Amino acid sequence: MQTFSYEARTETGEVVRGRLDAETERGAVEKIRQMGYWVLRVKQARRREGLAWHQFLARGYFSFIFHRVNAKALAIWYRSFSDLLGAGMNLHEAAATLAERTSNRTLRQVTREIAEQAMRGEPLSPVLDHYPSVFPLYAKALVQTGEETGLLNDTMEQLAAFHDSIYEIQMAYRTETFYPKIVLALFILIPPIPQAVAGETLGSLTFDWWKYLQLVAERVGYWGVALIALWFAWRLLMQFPPVRQGWDRVKLILPWVGGIVRRHSLARWARSMAMLIRAGVPLRRGLEAAASATGNEAMAAAMRVHIPRVQTGEPMSSVMVNSREFPDQAIDMVLTGERSGNIERMLDKMADYYEAEAAVASKQTAVTAGVAFYLLVAFMVGLYVISFWIGYFAGYDAALSGAFE
């Protein structure tokens, strides 16, 4: 039995909050509905019985350190699970086999827990609740649907394809930002060069490599410690929903950058929503899960407020309109899909369009940043060269003047 906190709306529109015990998140949702409420949000209580303090921290606020899993590792894990189940293995056999081959420490631990659950005849979805940073709501919704329909291997394959698309976007981003990163590295490595040059005359100038390496180490050390501390504090702050929601809203309103962020979020929402509908996830639960897939808490919060409208018979396009987070083009495509009965195809095309637009905008930004960094480094090098030769000739003139006196 697990404890869930919830936020719901009464028939009069009043928002109520509370806690209850249930076997699964789906069971908690059903209990809340039986109380006559419209469910706005259900979340498992952070502190779980039987967890030591270090386990609680690892699965809570510090999960971004202890449970780091990239999109590539997740795609391989989902696809391997799907292949093993498709080969005729039961859940326990597939999990036990995969646990021996998974290289990622967190996924290996997850797979072992799944194998233990399966040995007792229990489903795997409750295990995913222990690792919220690795398995968001859309992943749990698909897995639960797969368990209920007996098509777990198919939903696992869909999740693998979804993370493949995320991995491709990440690789494209790394390629586009490679040049600016190189220029930024030069910005760090070039300044210590004049300080490592020794000698009084032009013919006696030497380069002290040991001194240069010490200067670079000092420079990188200061920057490195500052950046690591800043990164850690920032990631810790992002674990608090109000802070993260506020920052995500700032990202959306920033000139140029906001457009890229919104396109990426819309593409992820459309791709995950198509996947959830295709898997047979109920519309309300699918909308809640897809909101978490956007990667932007501000957009997700705006969507969740209007999700209860689908219980009154309103279509998905109505939620999109009222959230005010979707452009008219996206709403028109979804509306067309609803009326034609082929909404999954329209959502996939919508994701393709926004991924392409985001890729072009990201590349333009990377090129612009690369040129800006290049000019900055060139200007810095020019200043160092000019100052070095001014100092050198000033010393040379002083030496000549002293020789003739």
Image (cartoon, rainbow, N blue to C red):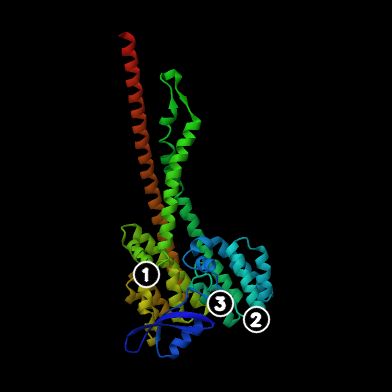
Element under disc 1: helix
At 51% across and 63% down in the image, what residue appears?
165
Which residue corresponds to the image point at 35% horizontal and 25% vertical from the top-left?
Answer: 389
Is mark 1 in CB contact (under 8 Å) with mark 3?
A: no
Q: Which residue is mark 3?
A: 126
The residue that disc 2 covers is 121
Could you say which quadrant of the image residue 267 lies in? bottom left
Q: Is residue 146 visible?
A: yes
Vertical relation: 346 (above or below) 170: below
- Residue 131 is situated, as x and y percent measured from the top left of the image, at 53, 69
Q: Nearer the viewer, mark 2 or mark 1?
A: 2
Query: Looking at the picture, does residue 237 appear above or below residue 177?
Result: below
Q: Earlier in the sequence, mark 2 or mark 1?
A: 2
Q: Measure the alpha-carbon separation of dots 3 and 2.
A: 12 Å
Pinpoint residue 75: horizontal percent, then vertical percent: 56, 64
Q: Amino acid at mark 2?
A: Gly
Location of mark 1 (residue):
299
Mark 2 residue crowding within 10 angstroms, few (<14) / some (14–19) / many (20+): few
Q: Amino acid at mark 1?
A: Met
Q: Nearer the viewer, residue 178 or 270?
A: 178
Q: Quadrant of the C terminus?
A: top left
Of 162 and 134, the residue lying toward us: 134
Spatial CA span between label 1 and label 3 = 27 Å
Return the disc, 1 or 3, that comes first in the chain's sequence.
3
